[in-house]
Amino acid sequence: MDNEYFVSINDVSKRLDVPAHTLRYWEKQFPTAIRPITGTGGRRYYRPETVDKLIVIRDLLYKNGLTIAGVKKLIHDGKLPRAATDFQPTNIGASVVNNTTKSGETNTDAIDTALDLLKTAKQLLLNQ
């Protein structure tokens, strides 16, 4: 980022290609990570390190498919990566793919369990 000390919300919005109202929403959702300085008239100004966090949050949400709750958990746990490319998701799919027996064969029981969980989740969603 440039050597600017404070960046206006409009400049950040343009740099991140995210509407200003979305940035204001993220401030409310992630108050410990995003704290702009407010100037006269309530104008928001961001420090470069805050803009870096906003870039990570944007990428986690839009490129990695995390939810707001997922990003909140990362922030709460102190695991917000410095860059979204540093993010390593740990989910049931990854654990199933890496679940092998001693002989090196895939453990089909784990895959079957995962499929059953997905089918159950689908049924619950369709019945709502």
Image (cartoon, rainbow, N blue to C red):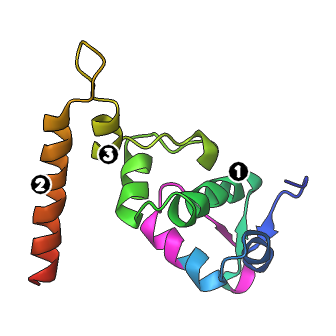
Residue at 18% across, 36% down: 108
Residue at 66% across, 59% down: 55
Residue 49: assigned label? 1
Q: Amino acid at mark 2?
A: Asp
Q: Earlier in the sequence, mark 1 or mark 3?
A: 1
Residue 111: assigned label? none
Q: Which residue is mark 3?
A: 93
Q: Is residue 80 visible?
A: yes
- 58 relative to 28, above or below: above
Residue at 66% across, 77% down: 18
**Residue 7 or residue 41, whichever sits in front:** 7
Residue 118, position in %: x, y? Answer: 19, 59
CA–CA distance in space, label 1 to label 2: 43 Å
Q: Residues within 10 Å of mark 2 (few under 14, many from 20)?
A: few
Magenta stretch contains residue 73: no
Q: Which residue is mark 2?
A: 116
Position of 11 compared to 85: left or right?
right
Residue 3, position in %: x, y? Answer: 91, 52
Q: Amino acid at mark 1?
A: Glu
Q: Which residues are magenta?
A: 25-41
Mark 1: which secondary structure?
helix
User: In front: mark 1 or mark 2?
Assistant: 2
Asked if the residue under mark 3 is in contact with the one under mark 1, i.e. CB atoms within 8 Å, the reply is no
